[in-house]
Image (spheres, rainbow, N blue to C red):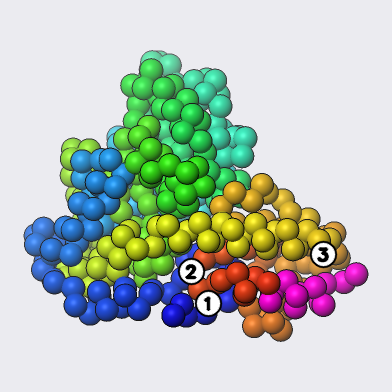
Protein backbone atom coordinates (compact mmCIF):
# COMPACT_ATOMS: atom_id res chain seq x y z
CA UNK A 1 0.00 0.00 0.00
CA UNK A 2 1.29 3.48 -0.89
CA UNK A 3 2.15 5.59 2.15
CA UNK A 4 0.32 8.93 1.97
CA UNK A 5 2.59 11.92 1.48
CA UNK A 6 0.43 15.02 1.17
CA UNK A 7 3.15 17.46 0.21
CA UNK A 8 3.08 19.69 -2.87
CA UNK A 9 6.46 21.36 -2.25
CA UNK A 10 8.49 19.09 -4.51
CA UNK A 11 8.83 15.56 -5.83
CA UNK A 12 12.04 15.36 -3.77
CA UNK A 13 9.87 14.62 -0.71
CA UNK A 14 8.87 11.18 -2.01
CA UNK A 15 9.21 8.32 0.44
CA UNK A 16 10.76 5.00 -0.63
CA UNK A 17 8.41 2.14 -1.37
CA UNK A 18 8.35 -0.97 0.85
CA UNK A 19 10.21 -2.85 -1.89
CA UNK A 20 12.95 -0.21 -1.86
CA UNK A 21 13.39 -0.55 1.90
CA UNK A 22 13.61 -4.32 1.57
CA UNK A 23 16.14 -4.00 -1.25
CA UNK A 24 18.31 -1.71 0.88
CA UNK A 25 18.25 -4.18 3.75
CA UNK A 26 19.24 -7.12 1.56
CA UNK A 27 21.66 -5.40 -0.85
CA UNK A 28 24.97 -7.17 -1.51
CA UNK A 29 27.74 -4.72 -0.62
CA UNK A 30 31.36 -3.93 -1.38
CA UNK A 31 33.70 -0.95 -1.58
CA UNK A 32 32.51 1.26 -4.43
CA UNK A 33 35.73 3.29 -4.65
CA UNK A 34 37.44 0.01 -5.56
CA UNK A 35 34.58 -0.73 -7.97
CA UNK A 36 33.55 -3.71 -5.84
CA UNK A 37 30.01 -2.89 -4.76
CA UNK A 38 27.80 -5.21 -6.83
CA UNK A 39 24.64 -3.19 -6.18
CA UNK A 40 26.24 0.05 -7.35
CA UNK A 41 27.70 -1.68 -10.40
CA UNK A 42 24.30 -3.13 -11.28
CA UNK A 43 22.62 0.27 -10.94
CA UNK A 44 25.24 2.03 -13.07
CA UNK A 45 25.06 -0.61 -15.80
CA UNK A 46 21.26 -0.60 -15.80
CA UNK A 47 21.12 3.18 -16.04
CA UNK A 48 23.61 3.27 -18.92
CA UNK A 49 21.69 0.59 -20.80
CA UNK A 50 18.32 2.30 -20.33
CA UNK A 51 19.65 5.63 -21.64
CA UNK A 52 21.66 4.12 -24.47
CA UNK A 53 25.10 5.11 -23.14
CA UNK A 54 28.32 3.20 -22.48
CA UNK A 55 28.77 3.76 -18.76
CA UNK A 56 27.17 5.12 -15.62
CA UNK A 57 28.27 6.76 -12.37
CA UNK A 58 26.26 6.79 -9.13
CA UNK A 59 26.44 10.14 -7.33
CA UNK A 60 24.87 11.57 -4.22
CA UNK A 61 22.68 14.19 -5.88
CA UNK A 62 21.65 15.86 -9.10
CA UNK A 63 23.78 18.87 -8.28
CA UNK A 64 26.86 16.68 -7.86
CA UNK A 65 25.95 14.81 -11.04
CA UNK A 66 25.75 18.00 -13.07
CA UNK A 67 28.98 19.26 -11.53
CA UNK A 68 31.09 16.21 -12.31
CA UNK A 69 29.64 15.92 -15.81
CA UNK A 70 30.33 19.57 -16.63
CA UNK A 71 33.86 19.27 -15.23
CA UNK A 72 34.46 16.18 -17.37
CA UNK A 73 33.63 18.14 -20.51
CA UNK A 74 35.48 21.40 -19.87
CA UNK A 75 38.74 23.13 -19.07
CA UNK A 76 39.27 26.00 -16.64
CA UNK A 77 38.28 29.29 -18.22
CA UNK A 78 35.84 27.78 -20.70
CA UNK A 79 32.42 29.27 -21.26
CA UNK A 80 29.34 27.09 -21.23
CA UNK A 81 25.97 27.86 -22.79
CA UNK A 82 22.84 27.43 -20.68
CA UNK A 83 19.20 28.47 -20.75
CA UNK A 84 18.74 31.54 -18.56
CA UNK A 85 16.43 29.85 -16.04
CA UNK A 86 18.24 26.51 -15.99
CA UNK A 87 18.81 24.74 -12.70
CA UNK A 88 22.57 24.51 -13.26
CA UNK A 89 22.80 28.29 -13.67
CA UNK A 90 20.26 29.45 -11.07
CA UNK A 91 20.09 26.80 -8.36
CA UNK A 92 23.47 25.10 -7.99
CA UNK A 93 25.29 27.60 -5.77
CA UNK A 94 27.60 28.97 -8.45
CA UNK A 95 29.42 25.66 -8.69
CA UNK A 96 30.38 26.33 -12.29
CA UNK A 97 32.57 29.22 -11.19
CA UNK A 98 33.76 27.80 -7.87
CA UNK A 99 34.71 24.30 -8.99
CA UNK A 100 35.40 24.71 -12.67
CA UNK A 101 36.45 28.36 -13.09
CA UNK A 102 33.83 28.39 -15.84
CA UNK A 103 31.89 31.28 -17.32
CA UNK A 104 28.17 31.04 -18.11
CA UNK A 105 26.68 32.31 -21.36
CA UNK A 106 22.91 32.34 -20.94
CA UNK A 107 20.16 32.27 -23.54
CA UNK A 108 16.53 33.16 -22.89
CA UNK A 109 14.58 30.15 -24.10
CA UNK A 110 10.98 29.58 -25.14
CA UNK A 111 9.43 27.25 -22.55
CA UNK A 112 12.94 26.11 -21.72
CA UNK A 113 14.04 25.49 -25.31
CA UNK A 114 16.96 27.43 -26.73
CA UNK A 115 16.56 28.31 -30.40
CA UNK A 116 19.35 26.93 -32.61
CA UNK A 117 20.13 30.35 -34.06
CA UNK A 118 20.57 31.76 -30.54
CA UNK A 119 22.95 28.95 -29.61
CA UNK A 120 24.90 29.47 -32.82
CA UNK A 121 25.22 33.18 -32.07
CA UNK A 122 26.43 32.45 -28.53
CA UNK A 123 29.24 30.10 -29.55
CA UNK A 124 32.52 31.99 -29.36
CA UNK A 125 34.66 32.57 -32.41
CA UNK A 126 38.30 31.50 -32.31
CA UNK A 127 39.73 34.76 -31.01
CA UNK A 128 42.57 35.36 -28.58
CA UNK A 129 40.38 37.74 -26.57
CA UNK A 130 37.48 35.30 -26.01
CA UNK A 131 36.98 32.32 -23.73
CA UNK A 132 36.47 29.04 -25.55
CA UNK A 133 32.94 27.66 -25.69
CA UNK A 134 33.31 24.31 -23.96
CA UNK A 135 29.82 22.87 -23.56
CA UNK A 136 26.11 23.24 -24.23
CA UNK A 137 23.83 22.36 -21.31
CA UNK A 138 20.16 21.50 -21.84
CA UNK A 139 17.46 20.82 -19.22
CA UNK A 140 14.65 18.33 -19.88
CA UNK A 141 12.13 18.48 -18.33
CA UNK A 142 12.69 22.17 -17.71
CA UNK A 143 11.73 22.96 -14.14
CA UNK A 144 11.40 26.74 -14.20
CA UNK A 145 9.52 26.65 -17.50
CA UNK A 146 6.84 24.59 -15.78
CA UNK A 147 8.08 21.01 -16.05
CA UNK A 148 8.04 21.25 -19.85
CA UNK A 149 9.36 18.26 -21.81
CA UNK A 150 11.51 19.33 -24.75
CA UNK A 151 10.68 17.31 -27.85
CA UNK A 152 13.13 15.01 -29.60
CA UNK A 153 13.17 17.44 -32.52
CA UNK A 154 14.10 20.30 -30.18
CA UNK A 155 16.87 18.21 -28.62
CA UNK A 156 18.25 17.35 -32.06
CA UNK A 157 18.16 20.97 -33.20
CA UNK A 158 20.39 21.94 -30.28
CA UNK A 159 22.67 18.92 -30.75
CA UNK A 160 23.21 19.71 -34.42
CA UNK A 161 24.41 23.23 -33.69
CA UNK A 162 26.73 22.03 -30.91
CA UNK A 163 28.27 19.37 -33.12
CA UNK A 164 28.79 21.84 -35.97
CA UNK A 165 30.98 23.74 -33.51
CA UNK A 166 32.63 20.62 -32.08
CA UNK A 167 31.37 21.05 -28.51
CA UNK A 168 29.79 18.59 -26.12
CA UNK A 169 26.17 18.43 -24.99
CA UNK A 170 25.18 17.72 -21.39
CA UNK A 171 21.59 17.09 -20.38
CA UNK A 172 20.40 18.00 -16.92
CA UNK A 173 17.76 15.30 -17.01
CA UNK A 174 16.81 15.41 -13.35
CA UNK A 175 13.29 14.46 -14.49
CA UNK A 176 14.18 12.92 -17.85
CA UNK A 177 11.87 9.96 -17.22
CA UNK A 178 8.97 12.40 -16.83
CA UNK A 179 9.94 13.81 -20.21
CA UNK A 180 9.98 10.37 -21.80
CA UNK A 181 6.58 9.46 -20.35
CA UNK A 182 5.07 12.77 -21.47
CA UNK A 183 6.49 12.36 -25.00
CA UNK A 184 5.49 8.70 -25.23
CA UNK A 185 9.01 7.49 -26.06
CA UNK A 186 11.71 5.38 -24.43
CA UNK A 187 14.07 7.41 -22.31
CA UNK A 188 17.02 6.54 -24.56
CA UNK A 189 15.30 8.56 -27.30
CA UNK A 190 15.41 11.66 -25.11
CA UNK A 191 19.07 10.94 -24.34
CA UNK A 192 20.01 10.24 -27.95
CA UNK A 193 21.16 13.77 -28.75
CA UNK A 194 23.43 14.17 -25.72
CA UNK A 195 26.96 13.20 -24.71
CA UNK A 196 26.20 12.99 -20.99
CA UNK A 197 23.00 12.89 -18.94
CA UNK A 198 22.40 13.38 -15.24
CA UNK A 199 19.12 12.06 -13.87
CA UNK A 200 17.69 11.87 -10.36
CA UNK A 201 16.51 8.72 -8.63
CA UNK A 202 15.24 10.69 -5.65
CA UNK A 203 12.48 12.72 -7.31
CA UNK A 204 9.50 11.13 -9.05
CA UNK A 205 11.22 7.73 -9.11
CA UNK A 206 10.96 7.83 -5.30
CA UNK A 207 14.34 6.42 -4.28
CA UNK A 208 15.59 7.91 -1.01
CA UNK A 209 18.83 9.34 -2.37
CA UNK A 210 21.05 9.62 -5.41
CA UNK A 211 21.44 10.40 -9.09
CA UNK A 212 23.26 8.77 -11.99
CA UNK A 213 25.48 10.29 -14.67
CA UNK A 214 25.68 8.36 -17.95
CA UNK A 215 27.81 8.88 -21.02
CA UNK A 216 30.81 7.50 -22.86
CA UNK A 217 33.34 5.43 -20.93
CA UNK A 218 35.90 8.21 -21.35
CA UNK A 219 33.67 10.99 -19.99
CA UNK A 220 32.35 8.86 -17.12
CA UNK A 221 35.93 7.98 -16.15
CA UNK A 222 36.72 11.69 -15.92
CA UNK A 223 33.50 12.33 -13.98
CA UNK A 224 34.38 9.54 -11.54
CA UNK A 225 37.67 11.24 -10.68
CA UNK A 226 35.88 14.56 -10.15
CA UNK A 227 33.36 12.77 -7.93
CA UNK A 228 36.22 11.54 -5.76
CA UNK A 229 37.72 15.04 -5.60
CA UNK A 230 34.38 16.43 -4.40
CA UNK A 231 34.15 13.87 -1.62
CA UNK A 232 31.64 11.67 -3.40
CA UNK A 233 33.68 8.46 -3.33
CA UNK A 234 31.31 6.23 -1.37
CA UNK A 235 32.16 2.87 0.16
CA UNK A 236 29.39 0.32 0.83
CA UNK A 237 27.01 2.44 -1.21
CA UNK A 238 24.90 -0.49 -2.35
CA UNK A 239 22.59 0.14 0.58
CA UNK A 240 21.40 3.30 -1.21
CA UNK A 241 21.97 2.05 -4.76
CA UNK A 242 19.63 -0.92 -4.33
CA UNK A 243 16.51 1.29 -3.98
CA UNK A 244 17.67 3.02 -7.15
CA UNK A 245 17.49 -0.28 -9.01
CA UNK A 246 13.90 -0.68 -7.84
CA UNK A 247 13.24 2.90 -8.96
CA UNK A 248 14.39 2.13 -12.50
CA UNK A 249 12.66 -1.22 -12.80
CA UNK A 250 9.38 -0.55 -10.98
CA UNK A 251 8.68 3.19 -10.71
CA UNK A 252 9.02 4.63 -14.21
CA UNK A 253 5.62 3.80 -15.70
CA UNK A 254 3.73 5.14 -12.69
CA UNK A 255 5.02 8.66 -13.46
CA UNK A 256 2.09 8.87 -15.88
CA UNK A 257 -0.22 8.90 -12.84
CA UNK A 258 1.57 11.99 -11.53
CA UNK A 259 1.00 13.74 -14.84
CA UNK A 260 -2.70 12.90 -14.83
CA UNK A 261 -3.01 14.10 -11.23
CA UNK A 262 -1.23 17.37 -12.04
CA UNK A 263 -3.68 18.04 -14.89
CA UNK A 264 -6.59 17.26 -12.57
CA UNK A 265 -5.18 19.64 -9.96
CA UNK A 266 -4.68 22.42 -12.51
CA UNK A 267 -8.20 22.08 -13.89
CA UNK A 268 -9.69 22.17 -10.40
CA UNK A 269 -7.72 25.21 -9.30
CA UNK A 270 -8.60 27.05 -12.49
CA UNK A 271 -12.29 26.51 -11.73
CA UNK A 272 -11.68 28.21 -8.37
CA UNK A 273 -10.37 31.32 -10.12
CA UNK A 274 -6.67 30.61 -9.56
CA UNK A 275 -4.45 31.43 -12.51
CA UNK A 276 -2.40 28.57 -13.99
CA UNK A 277 0.93 29.86 -15.27
CA UNK A 278 2.28 26.90 -17.24
CA UNK A 279 1.11 24.38 -19.80
CA UNK A 280 0.73 21.34 -17.53
CA UNK A 281 2.60 18.59 -19.36
CA UNK A 282 4.18 16.60 -16.54
CA UNK A 283 3.93 16.70 -12.74
CA UNK A 284 4.20 20.43 -12.10
CA UNK A 285 1.56 23.11 -11.74
CA UNK A 286 2.64 26.75 -11.36
CA UNK A 287 -0.04 29.07 -10.02
CA UNK A 288 -0.50 32.80 -9.39
CA UNK A 289 -2.65 33.53 -6.35
CA UNK A 290 -3.04 37.26 -6.92
CA UNK A 291 -6.27 36.58 -8.80
CA UNK A 292 -7.87 35.48 -5.52
CA UNK A 293 -6.07 38.03 -3.32
CA UNK A 294 -3.72 35.58 -1.66
CA UNK A 295 0.05 35.27 -1.39
CA UNK A 296 2.23 32.24 -0.74
CA UNK A 297 1.87 32.54 3.02
CA UNK A 298 -1.92 32.56 2.80
CA UNK A 299 -1.80 29.54 0.53
CA UNK A 300 0.56 27.63 2.81
CA UNK A 301 -1.65 28.27 5.83
CA UNK A 302 -4.76 27.14 3.95
CA UNK A 303 -3.04 23.97 2.80
CA UNK A 304 -1.86 23.25 6.34
CA UNK A 305 -5.46 23.37 7.56
CA UNK A 306 -6.19 20.56 5.11
CA UNK A 307 -3.17 18.51 6.19
CA UNK A 308 -1.00 19.42 3.18
CA UNK A 309 2.42 21.06 2.86
CA UNK A 310 2.98 23.75 0.25
CA UNK A 311 4.88 27.00 -0.05
CA UNK A 312 5.36 29.86 -2.44
CA UNK A 313 7.18 33.13 -2.96
CA UNK A 314 5.09 36.24 -3.36
CA UNK A 315 1.94 35.17 -5.14
CA UNK A 316 3.64 32.43 -7.19
CA UNK A 317 3.58 28.78 -6.10
CA UNK A 318 4.87 25.57 -7.64
CA UNK A 319 2.88 22.42 -6.92
CA UNK A 320 4.35 18.98 -7.62
CA UNK A 321 2.46 15.69 -7.78
CA UNK A 322 4.39 12.53 -6.96
CA UNK A 323 4.41 9.06 -5.43
CA UNK A 324 2.32 9.20 -2.26
CA UNK A 325 -0.37 11.43 -3.80
CA UNK A 326 -3.22 9.67 -5.56
CA UNK A 327 -6.25 10.83 -7.49
CA UNK A 328 -8.58 10.69 -4.50
CA UNK A 329 -6.13 12.88 -2.57
CA UNK A 330 -6.27 15.54 -5.30
CA UNK A 331 -10.06 15.39 -5.37
CA UNK A 332 -10.24 15.74 -1.59
CA UNK A 333 -7.79 18.64 -1.64
CA UNK A 334 -9.74 20.51 -4.30
CA UNK A 335 -12.95 20.10 -2.32
CA UNK A 336 -11.26 21.44 0.81
CA UNK A 337 -9.38 24.33 -0.74
CA UNK A 338 -12.53 25.37 -2.60
CA UNK A 339 -14.08 26.16 0.78
CA UNK A 340 -11.15 28.34 1.81
CA UNK A 341 -10.31 30.32 -1.32
CA UNK A 342 -11.85 33.81 -1.22
CA UNK A 343 -14.82 34.12 -3.56
Q: In the shown orientation, is residue 182 left or right of residue 332?
A: left
The front one of 223 and 301 is 301
* Residue sitting at x 48%, y 69%: 323
Q: Is residue 233 magenta?
A: no
Q: Position of residue 132 (x, y in %)?
A: 38, 25
Which residue has dot 1 on it?
5
Q: Position of residue 151 (x, y in %)?
A: 51, 36
Q: In the shown orientation, is residue 251 left or right of residue 184?
A: left
Q: In the shown orientation, is residue 300 left or right of residue 81?
A: right
* Residue sitting at x 36%, y 48%: 198
Residue contact between numbered discs 2 and 3, judged by CB atoms under 8 Å: no
> If you read the primary sequence from the N terminus, does the residue marked by circle 3 or circle 1 appear first?
1
Give the residues drawn in magenta, as a range.
332-343
The front one of 141 and 187 is 187
Which residue has dot 2 on it?
323
Marks 2/3: CA distance? 25 Å
> If you read the primary sequence from the N terminus, does the residue marked by circle 2 or circle 3 appear first?
3
Which residue has dot 3 on it?
272
Please tell me whether residue 89 is drawn above or below residue 340 in the rendered image. above
Q: Give the secondary structure at mark 2.
A: loop
Q: Residues within 10 Å of mark 2 (few under 14, many from 20)?
A: many
* Residue sitting at x 23%, y 53%: 46
Q: Quadrant of the N terminus?
A: bottom left
Q: Position of residue 125 (x, y in %)?
A: 43, 16
Q: Residues within 10 Å of mark 1 (few under 14, many from 20)?
A: some
> If you read the primary sequence from the N terminus, does the residue marked by circle 1 or circle 2 appear first?
1
The front one of 287 and 68 is 287
Amino acid sequence: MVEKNLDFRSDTVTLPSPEMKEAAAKAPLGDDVYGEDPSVNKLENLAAEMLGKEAGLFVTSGTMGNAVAVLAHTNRGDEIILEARSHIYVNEVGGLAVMGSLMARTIQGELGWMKPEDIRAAIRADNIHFPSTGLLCIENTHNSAGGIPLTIEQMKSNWDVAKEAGIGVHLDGARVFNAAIALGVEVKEVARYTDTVQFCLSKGLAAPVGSVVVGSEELVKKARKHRKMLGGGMRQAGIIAAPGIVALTKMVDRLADDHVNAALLADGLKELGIKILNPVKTNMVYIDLSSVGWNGVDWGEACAKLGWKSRGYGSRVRLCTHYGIEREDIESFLEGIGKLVPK
